Amino acid sequence: MDTEQIKILLERYNQGTCSPEEAAIIEKWFENINRQQSIVMEEDALNLQLDEVKLLINDQIAPAPAVTVPVARVRKLKPWYVAAAAVVLAAGVFVYRNISSTTTTDTTSYIANNQPKKASRVIRDGFVEWNTPYGVTASFKLEDGSTICMNAGTRIRYPEHFSKNARNIYLEEGEAVFEAAPNPSSTFTVYSGALATTALGTAFNIRSYAHEDKITVALISGKVKVAKTDNSKESTILMPSEQLNFNRVSLSMIKTSFSNPEVVIGWKKGILVFKNANFEEFATAIRNRFAVTVVNQSDKTEWEYNGTFKQGEDLKEVMDVISDLKSIKYTIKNDTVYLKN
């Protein structure tokens, strides 16, 4: 097994075509390289080390007719030979990664921990409570015929039975689309933090995550009135394709417009849409879609990202695009994505 074969093996690993046994060896020892990123090996020293370890490996296994490493031969290696092979692989990975500038990803544990989850529904003290975990959306119909579609990481509470004059919904955390069934004698109001949104025969989206500085109400169809829940009586009327951004810090309300509803409710179809998104908005969308936390350890703190990812594109495909555009690298470890310079 020569240096060129090792490099080809690494390339096959990067393309996801090597065997599970080969991948396990490479991933295990690349983790060691990650822990020692400050160590830079000179090319001459690397070549000497490669030559020495190749002799050890070639003494144990015969040269393979093809560039692949037979699984059976890998399993027969004694522990110290495995360690020697790991030196070659780790060194090769170090050179290969620096030459190709690709990004490190270890999605094995992420996939294992990302098993399908379900939204939960419980009845407590006369209220129905819905909760969607990250990576899950849920839709359901209310007793009056209204429908609610919840984004991931969302909590909603409402009475088990509405009164004759009012249908009050409480968006305690997260994002949801509300389609209110017409009923002139009964108001349909969604309470989200400092805002109360009232509608009749209307479809609208409310985004109110506690870790974000703003609450956004976007009207898809019909007409809504958005008011503060304090005693100021300040309110705003929204028409279709208009949205209201309420700043939790300054307590200001700013009305803007949008041309494509997909920008607002694309998440219902599994589409990621970013429009001038800052890092917090980007991280929230990634967490909702893939149930992972994004930790920014790079010096790229100013974000204003625009882009769209279709349904079916996986986490690695999304992060590959982001890392290229932002000139950063990323590592997926368990349920966390780390961004680095």
Image (cartoon, grey):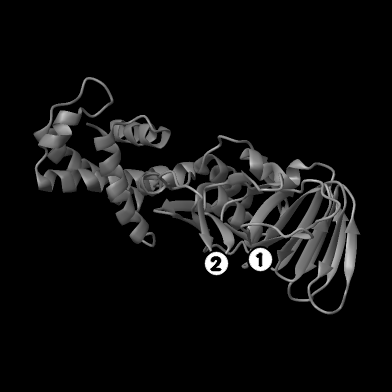
Q: Is residue 232 left or right of residue 128?
A: right
**Mark 1 → mark 2, Cα distance in angstroms:** 30 Å
Task: Name the image quarter holding the N terminus.
Answer: top left
Q: Please give the residue where the numbered disc 1 appears in the rendered image.
A: 212
Q: Earlier in the sequence, mark 1 or mark 2?
A: 2
Q: Residue furthest top?
A: 65
- Where disc 1 sits, the SS reads loop
- Occupied quadrant, residue 268: top right
Tell me which residue sits at (59%, 62%) in the image.
127
Q: Amino acid at mark 1?
A: Glu
> For the point 86% across and 64% down, which residue is it?
254
Q: Residue at x 72, y 50 (%)?
A: 178
Q: Give x and y (percent) for residue 6.
A: 29, 35
Q: Residues within 10 Å of mark 1 (few under 14, many from 20)?
A: some
Instruction: Give residue 66's mark.
Output: none
The answer to whether residue 40 of the structure is visible from this angle is no
> Which x, y percent locates residue 121?
52, 53
Task: Please provide percent x and percent y for residue 2.
Answer: 25, 32
308 left or right, relative to 330: right
Identity of the amino acid at label 2? Asp
Q: Position of residue 199 (x, y in %)?
A: 82, 54
Read off the residue under disc 2: 125
| Residue nearest the observer in this picture, 10 or 203 | 203
Q: Secondary structure at mark 2?
A: loop
Label 1 or label 2, whichever lies nearer to me, is: 2
From this viewpoint, which residue is outermost toward the bottom?
A: 231
- Number of marks in picture: 2
Residue 32 found in image quarter? bottom left
Of all residues, the one furthest to the front in this rendering is 164
Image height of 73 relative to 264, above or below: above
Q: Residues within 10 Å of mark 2 (few under 14, many from 20)?
A: few
